[in-house]
């Protein structure tokens, strides 16, 4: 069932992107421009040969975004090298213009390399968390008078617009099989809690009162009992890391009906709860 739900959400997000694009009058456009050559513009994922000399700065344009752009999220990389010190950002209505000035550093990693297919990558997010990706393949060509598109080998497709990743709450799996009724006064609760984002805390609750807590410190589980950090040996066992915690903790049952709950919270603030109910009978 969770897989079907995740798949449905992915379909809905894709539909939202399409509807937003239609409402805005067109799909988002990412282009590469060279101001030294007026009217020179190349669509996203183009392979471009540029003059080896006097090609000037490179401009990356995003237009017709689905929402206002968060310019603080803009990243430009050349051959996987961050180019932040050499980028000037100009906000546009539902877009952005990033000007990359090359040749201002003596380090050859911060400029286009000759006899090499240079990869210029661009990414930014909008206010709704949508991500925009641009990628261009640039080669220097001696004697070239103006930039031109070139044929190149096929590459794996890259999504130009990507919906924000879906964040899910933790998953609690209670492993111990508790009876509906018992004459025992203590039962061991065994459970495993997992989360892809990373767990923050797990709480064991008995009849509405928190009895045990597991907090993640440096991604390792640390147990608290009665509100205090455990500094001596106490009954039960806890092990795991920030992605998965397994524990087995004894629970003292009340005289009548006892409700035991496990609550979990992850690092993005999502919470979940699972519980068990047992009735204690007289021998």
Image: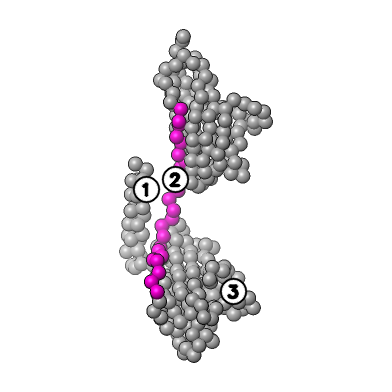
Whether residue 193 is visible, yes or no, is yes
| Residues at marks 1 and 2 touching, judged by CB atoms closer than 8 Å | yes
Residue 165 image point, x, y percent: 44, 53
* Residue at position x 47%, y 90% in the image: 145
Question: Mark 3 = which residue?
Answer: 109
Residue 146, located in which quarter of the rendered image?
bottom left
Residue 267 lies within the magenta run: no
Residue 7 image point, x, y percent: 34, 50
- Most foreground residue, 254 or 52: 52
> Which corner quadrant holds the N terminus?
top left
**Measured Cα–Cα span from mark 1 to mark 2:** 9 Å
Residue 222's place in the image compared with 59, above or below, is above
* Residue at position x 39%, y 66% in the image: 157
User: Which residue ends up furthest to the top in the rendered image?
Assistant: 283
* Residue at position x 48%, y 46% in the image: 196
Secondary structure of the residue carrying tag 1 is helix
Question: Mark 2 = which residue?
Answer: 168
Segment tinted magenta in the rendering: 153-176
Q: Residues within 10 Å of mark 3 (few under 14, many from 20)?
A: some
* Residue at position x 44%, y 21% in the image: 278
């Amino acid at each position: 069932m969770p897989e079907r739900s995740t798949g449905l959400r992915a379909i809905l997000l894709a539909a939202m992107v399409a509807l937003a694009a239609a409402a805005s009058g067109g799909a988002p456009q990412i282009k590469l421009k060279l101001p030294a050559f007026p009217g020179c513009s190349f669509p996203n994922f183009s392979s471009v040969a540029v003059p080896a000399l006097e090609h000037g700065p490179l401009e990356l344009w995003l237009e017709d975004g689905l929402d206002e752009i968060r310019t603080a999220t803009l990243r430009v990389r050349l051959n996987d090298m961050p180019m932040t010190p050499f980028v000037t950002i100009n906000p546009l209505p539902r877009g952005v213009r990033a000007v990359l000035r090359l040749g201002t550093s003596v380090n050859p990693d911060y400029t286009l390399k000759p006899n090499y297919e240079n990869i210029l990558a661009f990414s930014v997010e909008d206010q709704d968390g949508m991500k925009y990706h641009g990628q261009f393949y640039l080669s220097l060509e001696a004697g070239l008078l103006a930039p031109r598109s070139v044929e190149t080998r096929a590459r794996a497709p890259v999504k130009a617009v990507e919906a924000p990743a879906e964040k899910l709450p933790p998953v609690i799996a209670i492993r111990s099989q508790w009876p509906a009724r018992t004459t025992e006064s203590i039962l061991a609760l065994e459970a495993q809690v997992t989360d892809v984002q990373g767990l923050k805390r797990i709480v064991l609750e008995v009849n509405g009162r928190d009895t045990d807590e597991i907090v993640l410190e440096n991604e390792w589980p640390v147990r608290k009992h009665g509100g205090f950090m455990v500094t001596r040996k106490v009954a039960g066992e806890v092990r795991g890391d920030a992605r998965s915690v397994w524990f087995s903790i004894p629970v003292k049952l009340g005289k009548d009906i006892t409700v035991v709950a496990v609550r979990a919270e992850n690092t993005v603030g999502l919470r979940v709860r699972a519980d068990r109910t047992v009735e204690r009978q007289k021998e």
